[in-house]
Image (cartoon, rainbow, N blue to C red):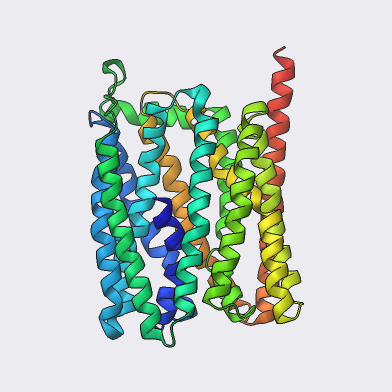
Amino acid sequence: MQYQCSLNGFSNNLYATNMGATDSQIGLIQLVPNLAACLLLLPLGRLSERMRSSRTMLLILLSMLGLGYMGHAAVSLTGASGVPLMYITLALTVGVIALYGGQWQTFFGDVIPLENRSSTYGRRNQAMYALSIVTPLLCGTLMNLQQDTAGKLHILRIFYLTAAAASWLQVAVLLRMPACPREIDIKPEPLRQAIPSVLKAVTEKEFLWFLVPFLLFYLSWHIDWSMWYLAQVNYLYLNESQLSIYSAFYNIGQLVAVGILAGVCRRKSPDYAVIIGAIGLVTCPISMLIALQLPKGIAFWFFTFALSVFNSAECVVPMSAVQILLRLSPRRNRALIANLYTLLITLSNSLMPWAGVRIYLALGGDRRALQLFMLIEFLMRSCGTLLLIVRWRRIQKRSLLSK
């Protein structure tokens, strides 16, 4: 799955660009597939709870993903219809991966005991980030060797077909794992009873103190996901090879940090560790503002170094979120609650990158507009980080009072 995620993160914008997409169309790359995922998250969560094993839905989604990547590889062969058709295949690839994420959280909770989750999640992420280093480097290097757009698109098609093969491989691996049938006493409630139970769980004070700060921080995190690519290509003038080098160094930083931060989660708590990741993400727009003032060659290496070091702690945000969510969610209807949370995060991931591009264009769509946008983003992330700090201080105070 990480091969597919790292390929999506590196290649989808380049795929659209090489098919002739405009800045506005680039902004839709996050919007369309994630909105499709939002429409299906809750029905799938409910259906998953009625299945005998949380593994079953993962197998269905992986099969769909394999077909989606085959279609994604083919859209660039359709000429002028390529970009519009790409949005459909994005729904079948990026959108399905978003659905998979919600179901995977439930599967993770079913098969991994509470006391082993931090170490297991950390080891998983180390393997993920190692793969994230190799994939962009290989793809970007091969693309940069091509002399024309047709050659670059051909390379991307090959990678998307290997992503389809990876889906079938994951199906084979899951089929060899134990099914982990659900316990009889925690079968899902009828929907009429489940809705009040879920509403009661998610409106508990402790759950709201998790949901609101995390959601607000994710809004500030997602707002630049399309703008980041536009800034790298249009203002830092990075080519495919440089984009892949940046991605590789960025993931090396994550690979080093994830083991350390998994230890922080175990020794302190996920509630504390997430603040480290948030502070790192606050530096992201500042790094871009500085890079924009530097000469072209220096800007690339400063930008790559700054993001590799200061933003390496980003990996702890989803790691902490999953553990806190599982800790605060009652075992009954956990899948539905996990999907409600994933729905909100996915909705943010669909709307905020598009909103970021619209803000940039409204500000003038030029270098000055980019600088103003980065300042707005810095303020948003700073406010989100302060909320997470307030949440941690509240947890500390309650812990002291209970002693």
Query: Exactly how many numbered labels are in the figure?
Result: 0
Residue 222 visible in the shown view: yes
Residue that extends furthest to the top in the rendered view of this protein: 403
Occupied quadrant, residue 396: top right
Residue 375 visible in the shown view: no
Classify 172 as above or below 290. above
Q: Quadrant of the C terminus?
A: top right
Return the x and y of residue 151 as percentages of the image width and height.
37, 82
Judge by depth and name the residue closer to the eye, 137 or 266: 137
What residue lies at 51% left-to-right and 66% top-to-bottom?
137
Q: Is residue 278 left or right of residue 223?
A: right
Q: Is residue 243 left or right of residue 192?
A: right
Q: Is residue 374 left or right of residue 189?
A: right
Judge by depth and name the residue closer to the eye, 11 or 386: 11
Classify 147 as above or below 269. below
What residue lies at 72% left-to-right and 45% top-to-bottom?
386
Judge by depth and name the residue closer to the eye, 305 or 281: 305
Return the x and y of residue 278 as percentages of the image width and height.
66, 47
Occupied quadrant, residue 108: top left
What residue lies at 37% left-to-right and 72% top-to-bottom?
156
What residue lies at 42% left-to-right and 81% top-to-bottom?
18
Return the x and y of residue 102 as percentages of the image width and height.
39, 42
Return the x and y of residue 208 as percentages of the image width and height.
55, 34
